[in-house]
Amino acid sequence: MKPLALLIPLFLLFKISNAQSPLEAGLFGGVVVYQGDLSESDIFEINEFNPAFGGLLRYHFDDKWKVRGHVIYGHISGTDKNAKDPALYARGWSYESFLVELTFVAEYHPWGRPREDNAGFFRPQLSPYVGAGAGFVNFNPKVKVENPQDAILFPESQRTTTALSLPIVLGLRYDFNEHYIATLEGGWRVTFNDYLDGVSHNGNPKKNDPFIFVGLSMTYYFGYEAKYHFGK
């Protein structure tokens, strides 16, 4: 019975690897930047881009609609030394934090088409897409001050470390192989939270702290199975 028992997991692995499952999985690498109380720019501070990486799993409903779940880890930072306002520059506050986002995103590919032609052969395709979703982001900001008297202001009593994340994304996907896909994407995250940098009431309580991810993902598609319909 032992030889038979050893063959069972091999048989299951063969069946799974040959099943046409419309799934793809892979890795993400890029940068993240935040917008908030320690970022004077309404867009982003170009010198506050930090590395980010993660993983994702995407399900294909059809050629145009897909949904994915992803986990991304990044490092964010900000400082008054980027400010053009002399008063803010002299204040000298800064912060840094880790950032972990768990989010589900629905993608719409308006020019998406079947990955195979009528004869069953794979055909490469370039597909722009838009998407939106919801999830959570966890963070742990550490605020630093130059004036020792400002230390009593932090941490603020109502500070939170988890927030709702609503991503809005724009991307370009290239299926260049039966199994491998490269995707370039940028996404703005709405958080409805003003404590991403640990500063709210002591900064600008009317301005929430969104953030931006930009990066490249490489994924492996499990659903391809060559079909040759010669003579049909």
Image (cartoon, helix red, strand yellow):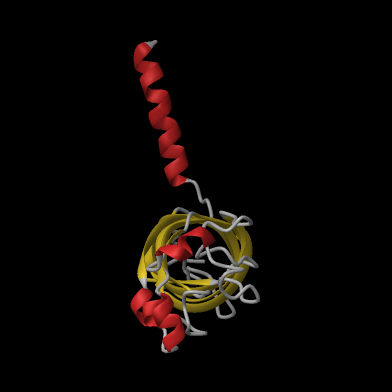
86 up-or-down from 194: above or below = below
Going by the image, does 35 lie left or right of 157? left
Towards the viewer: 179 or 140: 140
Towards the viewer: 89 or 196: 89
Can residue 197 be seen here? The reply is yes
Q: Quadrant of residue 193?
A: bottom right
133 up-or-down from 102: above or below = below
Q: Residue at x 49, y 76 (%)?
A: 171
Towards the viewer: 167 or 196: 196
Going by the image, does 130 lie left or right of 27? right
Q: Residue at x 39, y 70 (%)?
A: 215
Going by the image, does 227 lie left or right of 200? left
Q: Quadrant of residue 210?
A: bottom right
Farthest residue, direction top: 1
- Image x and y of residue 7, in percent: 38, 24
Can residue 230 be seen here? The reply is no
Farthest residue, direction front: 149
- Image x and y of residue 146, in percent: 37, 68
Towards the viewer: 59 or 9: 59
Report the label total: 0
Specify the quadrant that holds the N terminus: top left
- Image x and y of residue 128, in percent: 50, 79
